[in-house]
Image (cartoon, rainbow, N blue to C red):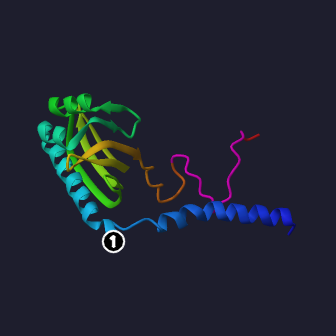
Amino acid sequence: MSVRRSLFAATCCALLLAPALLSSARPAQSSGANSKTDEEVLKANADCNAAELRADVAAMDACETGDFTHTHANGMVEHKAEYLQGVGSGAHKFLTLDLSDLHVRSYGDSAIVEGHIHLRADNSGKIADVNNELMTVWVKQKGKWREAAWFAVGLPASPPPSGRDLGWIDLAQPQQSKSPAN
């Protein structure tokens, strides 16, 4: 194998393995010196989510910063007033907010919560049932943790069991040409 090919192979392996190595270094739900802060942030997060499920706009208002933004998985951004109006009017009615694999990274008076969310909502009569990767940003203002930003990214659907539906490519199987038959 030539030196050039060896370097190319090593670079490819490094690029493929880097995300796995970095994700395995992710902190646990609550880590060491910041565990008290992390627990406070997780409680504030749970309280805010419970307020959303109840459509308790006053409680939501109290747990969010004045410049709060809610970025939906489809890319739509709502600022605090719009978002609270949507929840208060029933346009956004949360049916389920199941969070899992939550991790907190805290930095003094700010923190980031990451994890998975299974969300079911009635959006003006249209039921959304989605699984997202979630990131929220929290800041401590006047001694209280408040949510500054909520950001979701849709997770891809699981591939079909056969690996042969909806254009899913099974890399273990030889691919057939898509050109017309003669």
Q: Position of residue 166 (x, y in %)?
A: 51, 46
Q: Which residue is mark 1?
A: 32
State yes or no: residue 175 in magenta: yes
Could you say which is closer to the camera, residue 166 or residue 126? 126
Horizontally, residue 55 falls left or right of residue 92, namely left
| Residue shown at the point (31%, 65%) measured from the top left | 34
Relative height, residue 99 to residue 95 (above, below)? below
Horizontally, residue 159 falls left or right of residue 40, namely right
Q: Which residues are magenta?
A: 166-180
Disc 1 secondary structure class: helix
| Residue shown at the point (78%, 64%) measured from the top left | 7
Location of the N terminus (image quadrant) = bottom right
Q: Is residue 132 visible?
A: no
| Residue shown at the point (45%, 49%) measured from the top left | 156
Could you say which is closer to the camera, residue 105 or residue 11? 105
Horizontally, residue 161 falls left or right of residue 172, namely left
Location of the C terminus (image quadrant) = top right
Magenta segment's dominant SS is: loop
Relative height, residue 62 to residue 160 (above, below)? above
Relative height, residue 173 to residue 91 (above, below)? below
Instruction: Give the quadrant of residue 74.
Output: top left
Q: Position of residue 8 (x, y in %)?
A: 77, 61
Q: Count the marks: how many?
A: 1
Q: Is residue 176 visible?
A: yes
Could you say which is closer to the camera, residue 161 or residue 72? 72
| Residue shown at the point (73%, 66%) measured from the top left | 10
Amino acid found under the numbered disc labelled 1: Gly
Q: Few, some or many C-alpha atoms within 10 Å of disc 1 (few <14, some 14-19, many ≥20)?
A: few
State yes or no: residue 179 in magenta: yes
Q: Position of residue 70 (x, y in %)?
A: 32, 37
